[in-house]
Image (tube, rainbow, N blue to C red):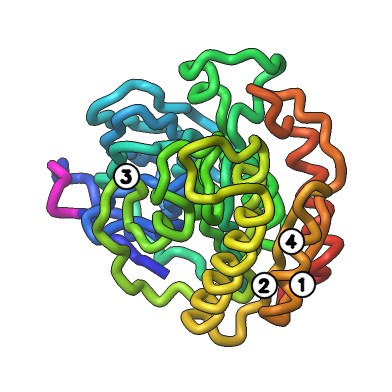
Amino acid sequence: MLRLALVAALMLAPSETPVPLHAGGRVTADGRFGWPGVYFEGRFEGTEVTVSVEAETDHLAILIDGVERAVLKKPGRVERHFAGLAKGAHVLRVEKLTETQTGYSRMIGITTNGTPLEPRPRPRAVEFIGDSHSVGYGDTAAVRTCTPEAVHDTTNTQLAFGPLLAKKWDAEYRVIAFSGRGVVRNYAGGNPGETLPVLYPRAIPGEAAPAAADGWKPQLIVINLGTNDFSTPVHAGEAWKDAAALQADYRATYIAFVRKLQAANPGARFLLMGAANFIADVRAVAEATHVQAVEVPTLELTACNFHPSLKDQRRMAEVVEGAVGTLK
């Protein structure tokens, strides 16, 4: 788990003290982050606290003791000060809501007029790997027809099935997901060569640099990939001559990806998700890698561009929980 002490970038008032932060998700040592679902937690005793962040296009929610106090939407550096808190210990949490496919945001730090406390460790950890369904693409939208701007503004990864379930389990979580990406083929054949297994090692999804080792050891890894590989027919000029060739490549590449993850995470349990149109392929991968597969039921898909709604996200969380049982 990454513990951040981002004091160098803060201009501290005499009465302010930096709060040590726990970073959830992939975050660089200097506080930069780009993958969805990233969060930061800090604990302190005091009546005032200040949050300093630097965002490009991300929307960031600030919660104090589990209650949302603000959602930051403006680009650039922002400092939000909260005063009049009750005496005693508090937990401040900053959550990334939106998806960042290029660029990044940065946590600068949290300060308090009181006493900093150490972050509370959680013994369980789970990783969710996937595409837009795992991102929570446009999941808060009430309509299916959305502009790109509307998709961005209505995406809330914290309400996607992964974070929902991890919070229920009181587990740390990571969401390594990118809308439109597949195992070997992206949506409609776009961005060839930039599939999720290629992006997976990166610290920031839009940058080639790999993530540094940070001691992350999930007990459970849930993968939901294949929707984009098979959502549109193979067209002329793509790497596969027909659907059968795509299917064979998907299975072989997926098996190799799971085995690589297994080698990096010995002892972790794996769950592979798949919809009805490609669950047979997912089950073949699961059998070859000796892991578990689960079929995602038919969803309403009433959110942006026929994506899972909040109701669908809750349904997927139920499916994963039913397959996993208790996270140990």
Q: Disc 1 residue type? A: Gln
Q: How many marks?
A: 4
CB atoms of marks 1 and 2 within 8 Å: yes
Q: Is residue 63 visible?
A: no
Q: Which residue is mark 3?
A: 206
Q: Disc 4 residue type? A: Asp
Q: Residues within 10 Å of mark 4 (few under 14, many from 20)?
A: some
Q: Earlier in the sequence, mark 3 or mark 1?
A: 3
Q: Quadrant of the C terminus?
A: bottom right
Left or right of 37? Residue 8 is: left
The magenta segment is 7-11
Discs 2/4, front: 4
Q: Which residue is mark 2?
A: 270
Discs 4/3, front: 4
Q: Disc 2 residue type? A: Phe
Discs 1/4, front: 4
Q: Which residue is mark 4?
A: 281
Q: Is residue 288 visible?
A: yes
Q: Nearer the viewer, residue 323 or 279?
A: 279
Q: How far apart are labels 4 and 3 at the CA level?
A: 29 Å
Q: Earlier in the sequence, mark 4 or mark 3?
A: 3
